Image: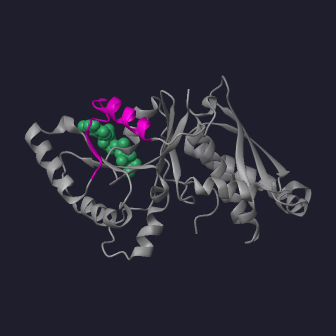
Amino acid sequence: MTQRAGFVALIGEPNAGKSTLTNQMVGAKVSIVTHKVQTTRARIRGVALEGDAQIVFVDTPGLFRPRRRLDRAMVAAAWGGAADADVIVLLVEAHRGVTEGVETILEQLEEVGKGRKVALAINKIDRVEAPALLALTKEMNDRFPFVETFMISAEKGHGCDDLRRWLADQMPEGPWLYPEDQIADLPLRMIAAEMTREKLTLRLHQELPYQLTVETENWEERKDGSARVDQVVYVMRDGHKGIVLGKKGETIKAVGKAAREELEEFLGRKIHLFLQVKVRPNWLEEAERYSEMGLDFRDGN
Ligand SMILES: Nc1nc2c(ncn2[C@@H]2O[C@H](COP(=O)(O)OP(=O)(O)OP(=O)(O)O)[C@@H](O)[C@H]2O)c(=O)[nH]1
């Protein structure tokens, strides 16, 4: 079996149904609210499997604040992860049609979408009659050369299998990006890691945060409803390890406490967070490799 794997950027106005659609695609409630942590450019919403393909759904936060006259550079920057994705899916709401927000997106697509595979997904078709749907399909396709149009109801699941199969076909050949057993809680692991990294950034000197990364290595649900979370803070040099730990481990302790509190508030349950600091000299190169794939684990500033 030839494996395929790639990235799909879901774009659309707030409330278009991106989370609902991701949940449908992934088949589990993993696409939890991801807006809280704003530091990375491309956030993973979820990972879907379809036949031999792994489809990684990424988000592009901060894209559609209604700023009409964006210059090229700003548009490119705002589109971040979407510009690197293998497929872009624009999600619009059937009953709302071409709103001002959709107009903005279409304008930006003229810049960013050129030569890219951009599909249109008209969502919430359960809320409109067929003629309105056809009119919207025509209007949108007159405005932009979408490679494909899907009519779906993310909530009810209509049309979602077709969309997932089509997306799977578009994924380039290549090994899967994530081990199968980690897929379900991947977004959660990443969010938790970002929270810790954010706390480290707040506490440490400016230059250091760029040279460290946090990974959630283990996530274990406990019977009492709490979870044990093990994270590793990777630094590039031995000297950095001491800085991250702090005097008598004070720094890492404070970081762990702040991150745990935020995670507990975010999830609404008790978390046992364990942090370790390890030296891994070449993580930066690895991070750059990820960033080529449309992911950026470092600060997006
Ligand atoms: N009727 C109907 N409602 C839907 C459908 N899909 C999503 N919704 C509803 O639309 C609302 C917004 O859905 P979300 O998935 O949260 O939208 P979103 O695009 O992720 O929103 P943001 O994360 O805020 O950008 C929710 O109340 C959903 O239940 C659909 O197919 N039909």
Q: Is residue 231 visible?
A: yes
Magenta residue check for 155: yes
**Figure check: 104 above or below 268:** below
Magenta residue check for 55: no
Which residue occupies 57% across, 58% down?
Answer: 40
In which quadrant of this rendering is ligand 1 seen?
top left
Image position, residue 112 (x, y; %): 38, 64
Which residue occupies 71% across, 51% down?
Answer: 214
- Looking at the image, the residue that sits furthest to the top is 223
Is 279 in front, or is 245? 279
Image position, residue 246 (x, y; %): 86, 60
- Looking at the image, the residue that sits furthest to the left is 131
> In what quadrant of the picture does the C terminus appear?
bottom right
Is 61 in front, or is 89? 89
Q: Is residue 296 visible?
A: no
Which residue occupies 53% across, 37% down?
Answer: 4
Q: Which residues are magenta?
A: 146-170
For the image, the number of numbered tags is: 0
Image position, residue 245 (x, y; %): 85, 57
Image position, residue 270 (x, y; %): 65, 37
**Left or right: where does residue 244 sit relative to residue 155?**
right
> In what quadrant of the picture does the N terminus appear?
top right
Q: How is the image coloured?
A: one colour
Residue 75 figure quarter: bottom left
**Left or right: where does residue 182 sit relative to residue 204?**
left
Which residue occupies 18% across, 38% down?
Answer: 127
**Figure check: 141 above or below 156:** below
**Figure check: 243 above or below 86:** below
**Left or right: where does residue 137 sit relative to residue 149?**
left
